[in-house]
Image (cartoon, rainbow, N blue to C red):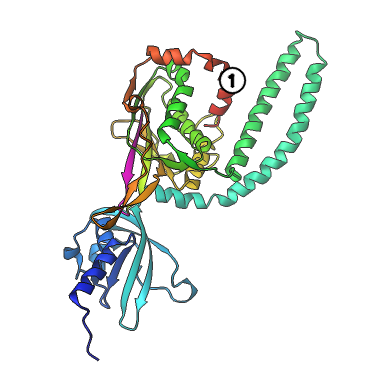
Amino acid sequence: MPRVEAPDIERDLLGRVIDALDTGLLALDEDRHIAAINDTLAKGWGVERAVVVGQPISAVFESETERWYIPVRGAEARATREVRGTVAEREVLMRYSATGLGDSGDILIRVEDLVDADTEEEVFRNTERLISLGELSARVAHEIRNPLTGVRTTVQFVASKLRAGDSRRDDLQDVLKELDRIEQIITDLLLFARPQAARPVPTDFREIVEKVLDILARRFMDGGIEVDVDLEADVPLVQVDPDMVQQVVLNLVINAIQAMPGGGVLRVTTGLRRTRYKKAYVDLTIADTGPGIPDEVKEKIFDPFYTTRSMGTGLGLSISLQIAREHGGNVTARNLAQGGAAFRFALPAMMVPEEVNGAPEVKPVEKAAERAEAKTETRTEAKASEPREAKASEPREAKAETREKVEEKA
């Protein structure tokens, strides 16, 4: 039966529809040459469509897995799979599904996501294996908390029976402080294992960052740390729980402070980032001038209970990553070429559809116009600058003890 060709106008419309999809599409013929590729995947791979069509798939996408494109039969036929490979001299991690096209031997591959192999998605996968560990942590925490309450009550009772000035009262106060520290570890364990439900609202990410910097103002001055702040004026809002996001920012900034015990420069920046798959994220980058992250611990820093500090719980970054994931975002870390480390906290930007030349276009939701321009300017804070000293010396000092407990989480 002869093949009926579609009218040119219908074919052109079909091609534009396929190119407009957020999903990457790739068609392979029976010889495993690229028969067709849509614009979304071509841009994601960083290749020219006209160049790769007709090429063997193995010559364009060099995979670590042989015959990764072969469809799976049975119940797993439509399941999403992962493959790592190199395309256009870039190592990527690709999530996809493959479907056979009838009896022709042709294959249609649907690419759902494509990221640089060593970035955030790797962290997502590594965190999945920690779920069972979180459940175990919750059980252990409850088993410890119950007898701990009895110990605290007994210590307080014994202390109340001693005369004022008795040196043993000081010893018992030290015991109570250590019990407080154990209690904080238990709280962190429960937060990691069973995080509180988020209550997201449209939020200006910059306001949270500025609040955290004000909270830690005195600590910057005491540690001889210069704070260089560059918060972009036109970043869109994010849909998050402000309290939970503040905890993440606080953890990351305190980590940076602890990485510079002899002082240094803390750089805090925000910006809007668009991915190849038309997604948009508001990024907060916190960079320090410390020694950086040793190669041998890079893969462990987000693991629960892993810490290089004698007084740390090893849960600060784990909880931060968990909170970011709950909001559809991520936390990643890398070493800087000039020295030091940078942590990036990414959150999905709130987007609204908008028509551009008759075609759908996605635009970020902007902050209301009444945002004061004075707050959007880049702030560079020199060591012990007068405005920052004034803020740090205000009644905020009265809350220092409460804040120290919050800081210990990191």
Quadrant holding the N terminus? bottom left
* Residue at position x 56%, y 51% in the image: 131
| Closer to us: 348 or 168 | 348
Residue 242 makes an appearance in the image? yes
Q: Quadrant of residue 77?
A: bottom left
Location of residue 243 in the rendering, given as x and y in whole percent from the top left corner:
53, 35
Q: Amino acid at mark 1?
A: Glu
Going by the image, does 176 lie left or right of 92? right
The answer to whether residue 311 of the structure is visible from this angle is: no
Quarter location, residue 282:
top left
In the image, what residue occupies the spot 33% across and 59% down? 22
Residue 274 colored magenta? yes
Residue at the farthest left position: 51
Left or right placement of residue 304 versus residue 18 in this view: right
Image: 30 above or below 96: below
Figure check: 202 above or below 26: above
Q: Position of residue 366 (x, y in %)?
A: 36, 40
Give the extent of the magenta segment. 268-277
- Residue topped by disc 1: 401
